[in-house]
Image: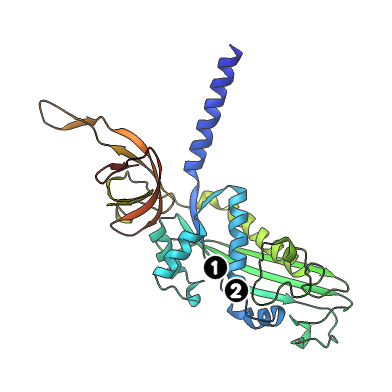
Amino acid sequence: MRRHLFSLTLLISLAATSLHAQDKKRVAVMNFEYGTVSSYVAQIFGTNVDIGKGIADMLVDRLVNDGTYSVIERKALDKLIAEQNFSNSDRADPSSAARIGKLLGVDAIIVGSITQFGRDDKSLNLGGVGAAAGKFGLGGIGKKESKAVVQITTRMVNVETGEILASAQGLGESKRGGVSLLGAGAGPGGFGGGGVDMKSSNFGATILGEATNEAVTKSATQLNAVAAKLPARAVAPVDGLVADVSGNSLVLNVGTKAGVKVGDKLTVARMGREIKDPATGKVLRRTDSDLGTVTITQADGDSSEGTFSGQPGVKVGDRVKK
């Protein structure tokens, strides 16, 4: 009896987990716009570093680890952005982002701006580069106290209307005596040449890294809190055919117009007999046999492509459904 009760409890738990996963809102995170602080970035790292991409990657990690949202893979987003000739100036534009989000089939798209990124020192007599009024300069090691400040603004955009559904502000600060912005966390040249991994423990151990992590964490917490406010999108059934087979890569004859979205998992089936109503001729059911699933990696209006997993032997004309 106990064994049966345990099995039943396990099945209920798995079912609840599956339903919860299906209820998650799907989001994508754009690279943050950082034009207002780009000159400070070049001073700090010695070259222009795309901190907007770095902070977006950090935010994706926070959202994925929390589990409130289903987050679109960055590769799929980057590929679509390249195809749409999306410019850096469009990063924080809600209408442009909404267009990308609609093509991805997400519930909302997240855009953001970096408004502060550098140092704010109490002492004005620092002699560092760009230390006018003690704001966001780049000084050397040995100052009495260095304070890193990072502030980001994040917006969640409805992909159907371009409406801003929620806004989050993240402010991070860290200060320490006797170190520079990148001190106490990097060896000599550790952040040179634009090769900066903002998710690394090396960067995270610096006061600038600590401030950045705090700002991103605060923004993620605020975004997670508004998940229930996102309007649910109608999920349409998908019924199409395999149009091309190349190894485990399938091209389907259905795309975003039919409700297919990047990240979808569709069932691939071999069509069997059709059972018809003898009175009306209407198809009552098909005796299809499932072959496996195809995970959609890219989609346009009329077609999509994905990676197949399951029994070998999929062929053109096999059915795909959701």
Q: CA distance from mark 2 to mark 1?
A: 9 Å
- Mark 2: few, some, or many residues within 10 Å (few <14, many ≥20)? some
Q: Residue at x 44, y 51 (%)?
A: 263
Furthest toward the left, the residue is 279
Q: Are marks 2 and 1 in contact (CB under 8 Å)?
A: yes
Residue 154, picture quadrant: bottom right
Q: How is the image coloured?
A: rainbow
Horizontal side of 21 relative to 115 (left or right) equals left
- Identify the secondary structure beneath mark 2: loop
Q: Can residue 115 be seen here?
A: yes
- Which residue is drawn at the image coordinates 28% and 44% (left, top)? 315
Position above or below: 137 against 237: below
Q: Nearer the viewer, residue 261 or 280?
A: 261
Q: Which of 76/136 is in front?
A: 76
Q: Mark 2 or mark 1: which comes first in sequence?
A: 1
* Residue 122, percent from left and from top: 84, 78
Q: Which residue type carries mark 2?
A: Asp
Q: The N terminus appears in which quarter of the rendering? A: top right
Give the image quarter of residue 166. Answer: bottom right
Closest to the observer, 164 or 148: 148
| Residue in the foreground of this view, choosing between 312 and 127 | 312
Residue 93 x, y percent position in the rendering: 48, 72
Circle 1 sits in a helix, a strand or a loop, which is it?
Answer: loop
Residue 43 is marked as none
Could one spot residue 160 in this view of the protein? no
Q: Which disc number belongs to residue 31?
A: 1
Question: Which residue matches tag 2?
Answer: 50
Instruction: Give residue 83's position: percent from left, percent from top.
Output: 39, 69
Three-letter residue code for mark 1: Asn
Q: Closer to the camera: disc 2 or disc 1?
A: 2
